[in-house]
Image (tube, grey):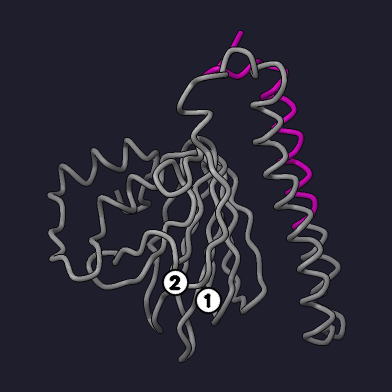
Amino acid sequence: MTIHGFSEREIARTSEAFGNIRHAFSTYEAVAIPRTATRPTASTAMGRLSLDYAFALTGFLAACSHATGASNAASHSGNPSYDAARPVILARGEGEHRLMQGRRPVYILVDSVTAGSSTIVAGLSDMVPGDSIPVHKHLGEEEILFVHRGTVDVALAERTRQVSSGAAVFVPRGTWVGVRVVGTDTATVLFVFNAPGYEKCLRAQSSRPGDRYVAPSAEALLAVRRECHQVRKTE
C-alpha cells in the first residue's frame, strides 16, 4: 500500500527519524537547561543547543530525503515536481518577503516556489513586542521552531514556557501551539515544516511590501486553512 506515493516502509522509516528528533529535543530540555540545577553559562547552553538542533534538523532532512530515495528514483525521474528543487544560500532579508496582515514581516525561505522543494517549507518571522501567533494546530505536518532572537511565551499542548534566543520547539502534527512575544525586543523565529501546506496560509494572509493588503473574507479564510491543514483553537 502507498500513501501519496510513499510505501509503508518509507513512512515507517520517516516516523522513526521523527522519533529521534523528539528524543533529541527532550534530551536538550532535560540536560542542557535543568530546572532545579544551576543553569549553564550562555555559551555552554548555546553550544549544546547548536549540536542538538543540528542533529535533529539533520535527521529531519535525512528523513525527507530518504522517503524519496532509491526505491522511488525511477518512478520520479523526469517529474518536474521532484526534479525542480535547487540549492540556495540565503542571507538575512532574502527569500520571498511578505507582510502578514499587511504589517508583520515574514520571509518564505524554502518551498516549491522559492526553491522548488516538494517536501520542505521553511520561513522566518519577525514579531514585535506584544505580537502573537494564536493557538492553532497543523493536521498534516510536523514543525520545528527555532527562536533566533528575543523572548517568547510558547504554548505547546497543555503547557506554556517562556524561552529566549537559542530555544527550539518540536511540534508534532495535531498539537496545539501558539507564540507570544514578551519583553521589549523584536523576536525572530525560524519555522520548518516537513511537508507542504502552510505556505498557502502564509500567502493568503499576507501581501508584498508596497502592496495594499486585502483581508480575505471569513469564508475564504476558512477554505484556505482547510487547504493548508490548519485549525485555530477558537474556531
Q: Which mark is residue 93?
A: 2
Q: Nearer the viewer, residue 109 or 233?
A: 109
Estimate the x, y position of residue 117 in percent, counting from the top left. 51, 40
Q: Which mark is residue 152?
A: 1
Tell me what residue is drawn at x 77 percent, y 65 percent.
29
In this picture, residue 28 sits left or right of residue 2: right
> Vertical placement of 166 versus 1: above or below?
below
Estimate the x, y position of residue 32 in percent, counting from the top left. 82, 71
Q: Which residues are magenta?
A: 1-25
Q: Which mark is residue 40?
A: none
> Vertical placement of 195 versus 4: above or below?
below
Tell me what residue is drawn at x 32 percent, y 48 percent.
201
Q: For the view shown, which residue lies furthest in the top direction?
A: 1
Tell me what residue is drawn at x 29 percent, y 52 percent.
203
Of the 4 image quadrants, the one containing the N terminus is top right
| Nearest to N terminus: mark 2 or mark 1 | 2
Estimate the x, y position of residue 125 in percent, counting from the top left. 44, 67
Q: Residue type at mark 2: give it.
A: Gly
